[in-house]
Image (cartoon, rainbow, N blue to C red):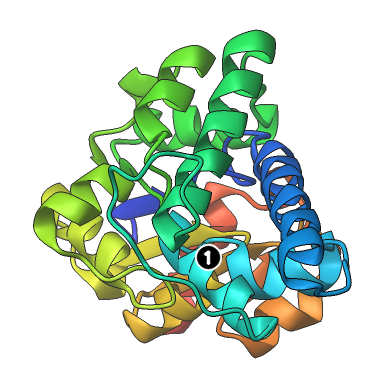
């Protein structure tokens, strides 16, 4: 059966895997420890890291070091950027980012990874109809997470934080990871779907001129996703079918 679209590119954390919460908690642990440190060392009153006011606007969906940088700037904190091999004890953007990653990996190794079953079901249905599927994420832990969840075989291409660093790709809200994934799949952007739960992610899908940018409002943030570039928004992928996606593309012809 001929379809009106050829490929779907999924974000990972919060779309396929239930790791967005783990990321948020790992960021909070690291930043709260650092903000307490600044309180003692620089006499800056401690103000805790908030999921709603800090994680979602400054960190969610961005490459790790960009997230650190954006949050610190929002608090007027300026520290050296450092390098990616900085020790976790070093007071640099990279040092803090590496400290967060250490927290995240400890949780993943101990607790494993849960998936959204509705997302896996949609992926399997897409594959059964010969629609290409890829994963694109800012995370450098993508391969570890996919392996822990036992779902690496579902994706024809993977463009993650490691690939981005190797290729010099810009992070979200720029569309580089999604356009690269589409290129790897041999799919045109206008006949491809991007599925994202982060504001920076739907902004990237919109900037990349994809045929459909589908927002997943895990944070009950339907309007925010729509106003930042999502063409359609659902709260879970069980709410949308391949036919719904196909009909969307048909109406654009």
Q: Which quadrant of the view contains residue 147?
A: top left
Q: Residue at x 61, y 86 (%)?
A: 228
Please give the name of the residue rendered at 80% of the width and 60% of the height, measured from the top-left corner.
40
| In the displayed structure image, the side of residue 73 where residue 213 appears, left or right | left
Q: Is residue 161 above or below residue 130?
A: below
In the rendered image of this protein, does residue 235 appear above or below residue 103?
A: below
Q: Residue 205 occupies which quadrant of the picture?
A: bottom left
Residue plotted at (64% across, 46% down): 14
Point out residue 119 in the picture as x, y percentages from the top left corner: 60, 37
Quadrant of the frame with the N terminus: top left
Q: Is residue 170 above or below residue 118?
A: below
- Residue 3 on image: x %, y %: 33, 55
Query: Could you say where residue 146 lies in the image, as x and y percent from the top left?
Result: 44, 24
Quadrant the C terminus occupies: bottom left
Q: Is residue 41 visible to the viewer in this orientation of the structure?
A: yes
Query: Closer to the camera, 116 or 98?
Result: 98
How crowded pointer 1 is (Cα within 10 Å; few <14, some 14-19, many 20+) is rated as: many
Give the structural element (helix, strand or loop) at label 1: helix
Please say if 189 is above or below 160.
below
What is the x, y in percent for residue 93? 45, 62
Q: From the image, tell me which residue sits under label 1.
A: 67
User: Which residue is painted at 53% across and 61% down in the image?
Assistant: 61
Of residue 28 and residue 197, the one placed in the foreground of this image is 28
* Camera-side residue of 114 and 161: 161
């Amino acid at each position: 059966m001929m379809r009106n679209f050829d490929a779907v590119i999924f974000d990972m954390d919060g779309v396929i895997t239930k790791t967005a919460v783990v990321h948020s908690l790992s960021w909070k642990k690291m930043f709260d420890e650092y903000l307490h440190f600044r309180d003692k060392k620089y006499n800056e009153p401690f103000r805790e890291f908030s999921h709603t006011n800090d994680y979602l606007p400054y960190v969610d969906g961005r490459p790790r070091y960009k997230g650190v940088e954006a949050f610190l700037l929002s608090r007027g904190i300026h520290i050296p950027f450092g390098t990616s091999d900085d020790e976790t004890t070093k007071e640099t953007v990279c040092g803090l980012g590496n400290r967060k990653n250490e927290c995240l990996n400890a949780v993943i190794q101990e607790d494993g990874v849960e998936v959204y079953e509705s997302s896996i079901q949609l992926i399997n249905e897409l594959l059964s109809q010969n629609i290409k599927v890829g994963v694109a994420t800012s995370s450098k832990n993508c391969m570890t997470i996919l392996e822990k969840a036992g779902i690496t075989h579902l994706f024809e291409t993977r463009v993650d934080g490691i690939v981005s660093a190797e290729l010099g790709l810009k992070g979200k809200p720029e569309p580089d990871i999604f356009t690269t994934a589409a290129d790897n799949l041999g799919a045109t952007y206008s006949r491809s779907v991007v599925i994202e739960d982060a504001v920076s992610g739907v902004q990237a899908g919109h900037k990349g001129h994809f045929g459909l940018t589908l927002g997943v409002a895990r944070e009950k943030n339907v309007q925010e996703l729509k106003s930042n570039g999502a063409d359609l928004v659902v709260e879970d992928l069980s709410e949308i079918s391949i036919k719904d996606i196909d009909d969307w593309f048909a109406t654009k012809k």
